[in-house]
Amino acid sequence: MNIKQKINFEKTFLYTTILFALTIPLSRALISFFILLLVTLWVYEGEFQRKYNLLKNNKLIIALSLFSIYSLFSVFFSADIPEALNRIRLLSYWIVILVIITSIKKENVETVITAFLTGMFISEVLAYGIFFELWSFNGVTPENPSPFMMHINYSIFLAFTSLLLLNRIISDRYTLQEKLFLTLFFLTVTGNLFLAAGRTGQVALIVGIIIMTAIHYKISIKSFLISILLIGSIFTVAYNVSDTFQKRSNAALSDMKSVSELDFDSSWGIRSAFYITSFEILKEHPFGVGIGDVLLANKEVLKNNEFPYFNQNVKDFISKSEPHNQYLFILIQMGFIGLGLFLFIIYTLLKLPIDNREIKEISIIFVTIFFTSALFESILISQFPIALFILFIGLFGASSVNKNKIEK
């Protein structure tokens, strides 16, 4: 018996995916390690005919493949080839979705999700320790206690975790004792979300609460009132307890007032300015400028247009940065075709035929949080959100296929 025959690949993939899920909120290095390990195991296992049969008619895989192929095609009309190849490198992480779909049984999906929640619990303990100055960690300050990742990305993780827990609390599938623990966990996670400076997750949480209550109570007066009560309670308490949230909320209102007066020199103002510059770019390049060429396009549009309502600070920022919006980012690079393919991915995710009711609910919540956040940040160019994306898209895909039927 050779080494390959001695390996129980089913258990190996399960344990590796559990460890991957556990470490996603905790370590860049471990994310890279487990991605490489999962892909290596997948290739070494072989059985490509079985895997092909499982994936060939999967609409989610078709949607992901079309977007990936068009991204590769757009390299040919890119000017910044090194940056284009870097974007393709990040896109290559998506192969882990195939690994998870073909290797994880649907009955094990909840176990992997629990591992992710455990990782978030560890992250949260460290974050609160930083906030209360019990320890220092990686130079992170108590004013913005995000121990492992940029505060915007951390806010997305926290918003999703918060709603994942709240969804379990209001469901009828857990005991009272379990709900007491879930409630405590929910309160600390949600509190953590408002201690940090990431407004992206906070806005996504509002949309997520509305969608979650609609899932449980349909679109009705009851769901509307519950949404208003939850949102009002959470944000009122946060505003009165968290100095960081209060300051960031006031700053957001100030930013919106400034934008209405054509002053774009602020966080939300610059995000608004990117809509204007992106519109000008798309007028000249409706099929996009090519993957990786965002900065070149920004510099070119600033060169060719005066934009008298942008001061020098705004122009300098735009010339050196991506648009902080995943949809605009794709539009600039791959035009309306690329955006259409990206929206098709979202559509297929929402339409996944998942039998497990709770996993189906979580999939809708995840799509809501992740792709609402994409309105305020280019989240698929950063390692932590990419890892979150490939893990859960893979798990939802695994939950939607009948492996036993395919194998027969």
Image (cartoon, grey):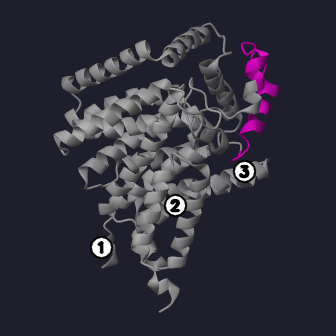
Q: Are marks 2 and 1 in contact (CB under 8 Å)?
A: no
Q: Nearer the viewer, residue 68 or 169?
A: 169
The first of marks 2 and 3 along the sequence is: 3
Numbered badge on residue 84: 3
Q: Is residue 192 magenta?
A: no
In the depicted structure, whether residue 301 falls above or below residue 9: above
Q: Position of residue 120 (x, y in %)?
A: 44, 43
Q: State the extent of the magenta-drawn residues as a range.
A: 290-316
Between 289 and 402, which is closer to the camera in this rendering? 402
Residue drawn at (76%, 18%) of the image: 313
Residue 103 appears in which quarter of the rendering?
bottom left
Under circle 2, the secondary element is: helix
Amino acid type assigned to the residue bearing label 3 in the image: Ala
Task: Classify mark 3: residues with Cα within 10 Å, few (<14), some (14-19) or many (20+).
Answer: many
Q: Which mark is residue 96?
A: 2
Residue type, numbered disc 2:
Val
